[in-house]
Image (cartoon, helix red, strand yellow):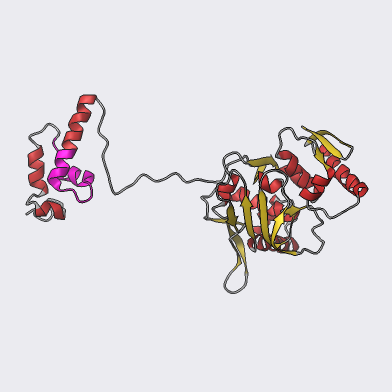
Amino acid sequence: MARAGKLPVPAPTAVAEGKNPREVSAMTQRDPSALTPEEIQKEALPGESWEAAARRIARKRAEAGKSGTPPKPQNPTSAKAAPIIRLPFWPESQRGAPNEIVRSALFNARNRKQKRGYLANVDVYVIGDGSITYTGEELRQDDETVWLHLIHLARNTPPGELVEFGPHAFCKAVGWDASGKSYQRLRDCITRLQATALGVYSKRLKEGLSLSMIPFFRWKNAEGHALKTYQVRIAPEMVEFFGEVHYTQFEWEQRLALPSGLASWLHGYFASHREPFPVKLETIREGAGLTMERLDHLREKVAAALEALRTVGFLVSWRVEKDLVYVVRA
């Protein structure tokens, strides 16, 4: 029996076989690959006797010596950590969103001051492949601006972990003045994003996705006082929604320089195509979630938005012919 203070306590399997670390170590000294009790204890497999461990480790080291490859210690208690899958990482000057989002009416281009309706499991218009169902208060372009910056902050953290930020810095980052009114507007936007149920179905998504855009939001303490640091959590499923290549990156300063509405919606839509193809005015109306019926009014609104995109440097040129919109990106 090993004495306390000199040898580690043998594993139960070693005791059952009548061996202790000192005896096993002595056995291995007949081999050039001599082992200490500490080495045996470190590299022994779960449930393996000291004698069996010593023989296995010695044999492994002997074989490694013949091949010229140094042996690698085996530590069964520390499994190799699986890689953490995160949101895509883009430069500070850009923001990113899944293609299905920027090609849909989820964040519509209506005036944010108009009354918002409540939608219950409604099919959202999507241009191209995929479908979206949505439950929650109607979302506008200012909600998308907030959501884009939340996603931008979340790209630095593992999926599902809390994202923390100060309301002052956040409002500045989305182009709003840092005032109490803006703080309230920010909280309203995040609350709308929190109270959502989003279903996304696409060929690239094997089983589709169902998620809340912002599962968690905390901005006040137990006493009801506003916190200096807000906390949100992005749904882990958002990583799959972005995928490796199925998302759009666009210049943030360009978006902030545009009027919030159709111009910002078109900015995201055209950014999702390297060489945009001609698109019908009616398709833009549906994709942007506009309600105007007269085509002459729609032409005027689209023309003004396209000119704004040219002014900020996103488009080189644009034209509308026979109710088809043609654009050339910068």
Residue numbers of the magenta segment: 34-56
Q: Quadrant location of residue 26?
A: top left
Q: Position of residue 156 (x, y in %)?
A: 55, 47
53 inside magenta stretch: yes
Q: Is residue 26 above or below residue 211?
A: above
Q: Position of residue 62 (x, y in %)?
A: 17, 30
Residue at x 84% of width, y 55% of height: 291
Residue at x 71% of width, y 36% of height: 273
Q: Residue furthest right?
A: 296
The mark tally for this picture is: 0
User: Is residue 10 visible in this depiction of the protein?
Assistant: no
Q: Is residue 247 above or below residue 15?
A: above
Residue at x 61% of width, y 59% of height: 212
Quadrant of the image for the C terminus? Answer: top right
23 inside magenta stretch: no
Q: Specify whether 221 is left or right of 283.
A: left
Observer-nearest of 47 and 222? 47
Q: Position of residue 66 (x, y in %)?
A: 20, 25
Judged by its main secondary structure, the magenta piece is helix
Q: Quadrant location of residue 269?
A: top right
Quadrant of the image for the N terminus? Answer: bottom left
User: Is residue 116 visible in this depiction of the protein?
Assistant: yes
Q: Position of residue 19 (x, y in %)?
A: 8, 49
